[in-house]
C-alpha cells in the first residue's frame, strides 16, 4: 500500500452532455468515465480513495457500491477548492493527496506515479503545453520563463491578455500534502471572475509559504483530456480503442485494421490470432492460438478455443467454442451454447443453452435450443428443436452418430438414440430408437390427369 490519499472530483453536472445521465456515468468502452478513474486510482494502491459527488449523487454512488470508496457530498458546486474541502474528513491528514477528475478517464498510472515521486512532501502539478490552451488555467512562472519557478495559476476567465498567451496549462491533476490542504482550503476566497473557490489558488499560498512546486507533463496530452461533450467523449473513445489495439499488436495479434475494432471489456488472445475489421468484443473474451475472427462479428463473454474460425457476421454471447470449430457466417450463439472440438455451426443457425459434442455439424438454417447433442451428429437444414410449449421449456437429447434429415421438428422433451436416422420432414414427438430410421410423413400421392387452373379472361 502506498502512503497516499486520492480525491476524485465528480460533482460537476456536465450540462454540455445534454443528457439526463450524470456526466461521470457516461461510458468509454462500456465502462463509466468514473470507473476508469477509480481503476487507475486503485492501481496506485492508496490508503484512501474519496469521491466528491453532487449531481445525480444517488445514481453515481449506486454505480460503485465497493467498500473501498469513501463518498463526500458537495451539495452545491462552488468550485474545485470547495470540492476538495468536502473530502478532507475522509482522508489521512498525514499523507500526500492526489487530486483526480472523474471526467478525465485516460491518465496513465505511470504518469501519476512520477508526479507522486516528484512531489515528495511538497506540491506537484501535472501540466501540458498545448498549441491551443483556450479554456484552461495557465501556469504563471517567474519572469515568464519556461523554467522559471511556478508562482500561481490563473484561470482563463481571470487572465490578462499577456497571461492568455501562456501555453502551459493546468491539467487540474495535482498532488498536495493533506495537512497543507487543511491549512489552505478554508482560507480560499471566491472573488474572481466565476465567483468560485478555486483549488488552483493553493499554488500561490504554497509559494507564499516558501514551498517548492514541481511540475511534470504526461507523455501524451490525451492523458489530461476531460469529457465535457459527446464530441469529446467520442474522440477519447477512439484514442482509447487505438491504445487497446496497439496493446494487441504488441502482443502479436494480427489486426486487419487497428482503427476498426472495438474492445469493451477484457480480451485475451493466444498466439497467431487474426481479427478482421469491425469486430466488437464485449465483457470477457478469450481467443485461443491460431484462431481467426471474421469481419463484423460481435463476441460477448465468450471463450474460443485454438485454430477455430469465426466467419463474418457471427454473434456469440456467453458461449464456449471448442478448438477447430467453424462458426458462421451469420451464426448466432446464445448463452449456454457449449461447442466441442471441430463443431460446425453454419449460416442462420441459432444455438441456445445447448451442448454440442465433437465433430457435430449444423450447417444451415436451424434452431438448437435446450439440448444435449452428442458427437458426429449431422443436423440437416431447417431443423427446429421445439423446446417451448408456450408455457415451459423442455430438454432434447440427441445421442452420438445421429443423422437428422432436413426440415425435422423435434418436439421436446424428446430423445434420439445413438446412430438413429430421422428422415427429412419428420415431426418427432416420441423417442427415436437406436440405429433405426424414424420418419413421420404423409404418404406421397400423385393425381394423374389433373390440370392447372388457367386465368379467366377479363370481362
Ligand atoms: C479546472 C481548473 C483549471 C484547469 C481545468 C482543466 C480550477 C479553478 N480550474 O477548470 O485550472 O485548467 O480544470 O480541465 O480548478 N468539480 C466539482 N465541484 C465543483 C467544481 C468542479 O466536483 O464545484 C469537478 C468537476 O466535476 C470536474 C472537475 O472538478 O471533474 C473540474 O471542474 P471544471 O468545472 O471542469 O473545471 P474548470 O473550470 O474547467
Ligand atoms: Ca473541465
Image (cartoon, rainbow, N blue to C red):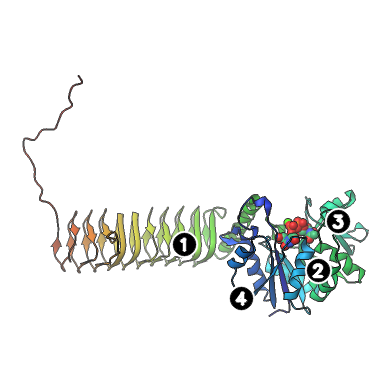
Instruction: Looking at the image, tell me whether mark 3 or mark 4 is earlier in sequence order.
Output: 4
**Residue found at x 91% / y 57%:** 144
Please name the residue that numbered disc 2 is placed on.
Answer: 124
> CA separation, marks 4 and 2?
29 Å
**Label annotation for residue 192:** 3
> CA separation, marks 3 and 2?
23 Å
Instruction: Identify the residue at the far front of this view.
Output: 75
Are there few (<14), some (14-19), or many (20+) residues within 10 Å of tag 2? many
Q: Is residue 453 above or below residue 159?
A: above
Mark closer to the observer (1, 3): 3
> CA separation, marks 3 and 4?
38 Å
In the rendered structure, are the residues bearing label 3 and label 4 in contact, judged by CB atoms less than 8 Å apart? no
**For the residue with label 2, is its CB less than 8 Å from the closest atom of ligand 1?**
no
Instruction: Looking at the image, tell me whether mark 4 or mark 1 is earlier in sequence order.
Output: 4
Q: What element carries label 4?
A: loop
Q: What element carries label 2?
A: strand
What quarter of the picture does the C terminus occupy? top left
Amino acid at each position: 500500500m502506498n502512503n497516499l490519499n486520492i480525491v476524485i472530483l465528480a460533482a460537476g453536472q456536465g450540462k454540455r452532455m445534454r443528457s439526463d445521465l450524470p456526466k461521470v456515468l457516461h461510458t468509454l468502452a462500456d465502462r463509466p468515465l468514473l470507473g476508469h478513474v477509480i481503476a487507475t486510482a486503485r492501481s496506485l494502491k492508496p490508503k484512501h480513495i474519496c469521491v466528491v459527488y453532487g449531481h445525480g449523487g444517488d445514481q453515481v454512488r449506486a454505480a460503485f457500491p465497493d467498500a473501498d470508496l469513501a463518498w463526500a457530498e458537495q451539495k452545491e458546486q462552488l468550485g474545485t477548492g470547495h470540492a476538495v474541502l468536502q473530502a478532507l474528513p475522509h482522508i489521512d491528514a498525514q499523507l500526500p493527496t492526489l487530486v483526480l477528475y472523474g471526467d478525465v478517464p485516460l491518465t496513465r498510472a505511470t504518469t501519476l506515479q512520477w508526479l507522486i515521486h516528484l512531489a515528495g512532501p511538497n506540491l506537484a502539478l501535472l501540466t501540458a503545453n498545448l498549441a491551443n490552451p483556450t479554456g484552461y488555467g495557465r501556469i504563471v512562472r517567474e519572469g515568464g520563463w519556461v523554467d522559471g519557478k511556478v508562482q500561481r495559476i490563473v484561470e482563463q476567465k481571470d487572465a490578462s491578455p499577456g497571461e492568455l498567451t501562456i501555453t502551459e496549462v493546468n491539467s487540474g491533476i495535482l498532488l498536495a500534502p493533506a495537512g497543507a490542504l487543511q491549512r489552505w482550503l478554508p482560507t480560499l476566497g471566491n472573488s474572481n471572475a466565476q465567483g468560485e473557490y478555486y483549488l488552483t489558488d493553493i499554488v500561490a499560498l504554497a509559494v507564499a509559504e516558501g514551498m517548492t512546486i514541481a511540475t511534470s507533463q504526461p507523455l501524451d496530452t490525451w492523458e489530461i483530456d476531460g469529457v465535457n461533450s459527446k464530441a469529446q467523449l467520442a474522440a477519447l473513445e477512439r484514442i482509447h480503442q487505438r491504445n487497446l489495439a496497439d496493446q494487441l499488436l504488441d502482443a502479436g495479434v494480427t489486426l486487419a485494421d487497428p482503427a476498426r475494432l472495438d474492445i469493451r471489456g477484457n480480451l485475451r488472445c493466444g498466439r497467431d490470432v487474426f481479427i478482421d475489421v469491425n469486430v466488437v468484443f464485449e465483457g470477457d473474451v478469450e481467443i485461443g492460438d491460431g484462431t481467426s475472427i471474421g469481419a463484423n462479428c460481435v463476441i460477448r463473454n465468450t471463450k474460443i478455443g485454438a485454430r477455430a474460425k469465426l466467419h463474418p457476421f457471427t454473434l456469440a454471447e456467453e458461449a464456449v467454442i471448442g478448438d477447430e470449430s467453424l462458426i458462421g457466417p451469420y451464426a448466432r450463439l446464445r448463452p449456454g451454447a457449449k461447442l466441442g472440438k471441430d463443431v460446425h455451426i453454419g449460416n442462420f443457425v441459432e444455438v441456445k443453452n445447448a451442448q454440442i459434442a465433437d465433430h457435430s455439424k449444423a450447417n444451415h438454417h436451424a434452431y438448437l435450443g435446450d439440448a444435449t447433442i452428442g458427437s458426429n451428429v449431422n443436423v440437416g437444414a431447417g431443423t427446429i428443436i421445439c423446446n417451448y410449449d408456450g408455457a415451459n421449456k423442455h430438454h432434447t437429447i440427441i445421442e452420438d452418430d445421429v443423422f437428422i434429415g432436413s426440415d425435422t421438428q423435434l418436439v421436446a422433451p424428446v430423445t434420439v438414440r445413438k446412430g438413429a436416422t430421422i428422415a427429412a420432414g419428420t415431426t418427432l414427438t416420441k423417442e427415436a430408437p437406436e440405429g433405426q430410421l424414424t420418419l413421420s410423413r404423409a404418404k406421397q400421392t400423385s393425381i394423374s390427369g389433373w390440370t392447372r387452373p388457367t386465368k379467366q379472361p377479363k370481362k
